[in-house]
Amino acid sequence: MNRTYRLSIFFSVFLIILVSIFFRSEHLEQSEGTSSNQKAMNNLQAEDLIMTIDLFMNQVKQDLLGWEQIRKQSDNTEWIVEELNHHDHIEAYAVLDRNTKKIKEEIGDISAESLDKIPNDEQDYLDEWYTSDPYIIKGSKKMLISHQQEHELIVSEVDISFVEHFVKDFAALSDREGSFVLGNSNIDVSFASQDMQSNENIISKKVPGLDWNLYLESEPSNETRTEEKKGEVVVTLSDGVSPEQWVEDHEVVLLDQLDKTIVVRDLTKNATEMMDDWFGDSSVKYMEPNYVYEKQASYNHSPTKRGAVGQTEAMLPNDEFYDLYQWNFKMLGLENAWGSTTGAFDVPVAILDSGIDPTHLDLEQRISSGYNAFEDNDSYQDENGHGTHVAGIFGAVTNNSDGVAGVTWENPIMAVKVLDHDALGNSFSIAKGIKWATDNGAKVMNLSLGDAHSSEVLHDAIKYAYNNDVVIIAATGNENVEDAMFPAGYKEVLAVGSVNQQNERSVFSNYGNHVDVVAPGEHIPSTYMGDEYVMMSGTSMAAPHVTGIAALLRSKEPDLTNEEVYQRIRDTALDLGAVGFDRYYGYGEIDTSRLFAN
């Protein structure tokens, strides 16, 4: 892959650590396990950040090695110039005489001040690679990375100032000398080790290969958060009642309408006061607050891989990050499943989320249609990134040598925007999106969203889709609680929890008797806005794995009903945890080997 996003791949994760969007549930009180759970979550965050930095460094090194090889083979400096233009974070590339440190060849401009960062002591070159501590030139934070050869040093200057934008809210980084270099300046990186250990809210870890230290401090938020849209009520009117007349008579503002259900607003009152005023009104069939849904906050081990049962020859994608990073697909045995089917054009799948980046290299060709539930038009541009990530797991373009592979290769994606730029939505917007997707032919639907409130308008939409034979997949949530979240808690939905690379329940994954199956949900690489790729963790990431596999099953066996698809997935799941169904893993991890065995 020879594009800008090659270098920005995993660093963008700082923007979205633990925000895999299964919305927060404000009514949940702090429990005894909150402190220990918060500590575990802090540790996961720190691991994500450390792994991200390590991956970024490896990507830079791989690019330098590639350019070095091209230069040696063909002396093609024009190609390297073009590559450098595509890589925003590599400022310059130079070849130096190892002994004199004089520049033999330079592409871009490395200042003399920067070159002074290169050590003269040969002891510093005992390792193949040398990385400098960060430094500031013209207001930008940079570092040098050099690769040693017998007589030459290949040097690259990397701009890392953009990292601070992503990491500053989470953590701080200090260099070899213990000096603060990046991140949250409110975190005192000069703490003595015993002080660090005494504060259970601070995690300290070494950054491999750099001798940097990362410090992460996080505490549970005690702020009171809004559960419902201010002054808004969802009202289902009785048959024969005119919405326009009802709104006029009740002196409220009509915000939106879906058949006989309307959303109205009166900013002089709260939802409870409005509903109290209308209690006993014969023109009202049902009413509820317009509940707010918001994103809530979510190691690198050897992946396991199950053997195939009666499968055709495995199919290996050539996408750049597949072999190194997509452990999740290998663990699910998808290489063998693809030998059975890669999907079908007549089985469209709706991704209801924050929208999808319509110009992303790995998604543009897969999107067939879209809808914006807020504006009631086809503008589904993702302004948050979550929907683009979910969509990439499900259906990134596969075998194009770029980026990541998707679970399905053929099924058209319907991009349904039901969350805004802050990943905020409400029961009504989601209900509208569900109905639109159903009416426009969706065969499978992914809902990596939800809340603890059971909304009737949302449930009605779910039942509408279910009764129209749509397979509905939903994430269980990231709060490590047993309470059912919705829509995952509805019986018409297949609820998906998260496991890690050891097939253990993720520390954040909600559980309970409503859980149907689990799927990989930690450190999942996928597409992100602006032709980028990031890692995210959460049940939001687990759900599209199951959505994709359900789409493959409906593609191969189109006569299956949605309930039959659910049952096949449950019956063929790999049993985890206690024998048989249990509240932590449901029926187990989705197993493509058994699902497609016949």
Image: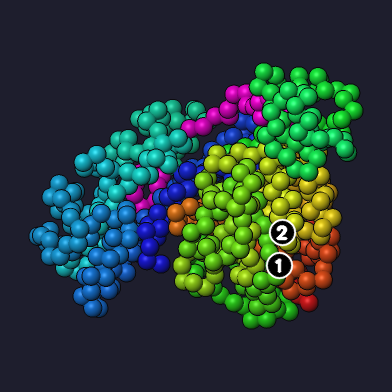
Q: Which amino acid type corresponds to the residue marked 1 in the rendered image?
A: Val
Q: Looking at the rendered structure, which numbered label has been put on residue 595?
A: none
Q: Nearer the viewer, residue 455 or 246?
A: 246
Looking at the figure, which quarter contains the N terminus?
bottom left
Q: Is residue 437 above or below residue 315?
A: above
Q: Which residues are magenta?
A: 206-234
Residue 165 at x, y percent in the picture: 39, 40
Q: Residues within 10 Å of mark 1 (few under 14, many from 20)?
A: many
Q: Eyeballing the image, is 262 above or below 587? A: above
Residue 431 image-quadrant placement:
top right
Q: Separation of disc 1 and disc 2 at Cα?
A: 12 Å
Q: Residue at x 68, y 54 (%)?
A: 446
In terms of image quadrants, where is residue 530? Answer: bottom left
Dot 2: element: loop
Which quadrant holds residue 297?
top right
| Mark 1 residue element | loop
Is disc 2 surrounded by few (<14), some (14 to 19) or many (20+) residues within 10 Å?
A: some
Picture coordinates of residue 485, whole percent (x, y): 74, 41
Residue 388, image x and y in percent?
55, 53
User: Can residue 98 be found in the magenta stretch?
Assistant: no
Q: Nearer the viewer, mark 1 or mark 2?
A: 2
Q: Nearer the viewer, residue 350 or 109?
A: 350
Q: Residue at x 38, y 37 (%)?
A: 183
Q: Is residue 373 left or right of residue 453?
A: left
Q: Which residue is mark 2?
A: 440
Residue carrying label 1: 347
For the residues bearing labels 1 and 2, Cβ distance under 8 angstroms:
no
Q: Nearer the viewer, residue 6 or 436?
A: 436
216 within the magenta span: yes
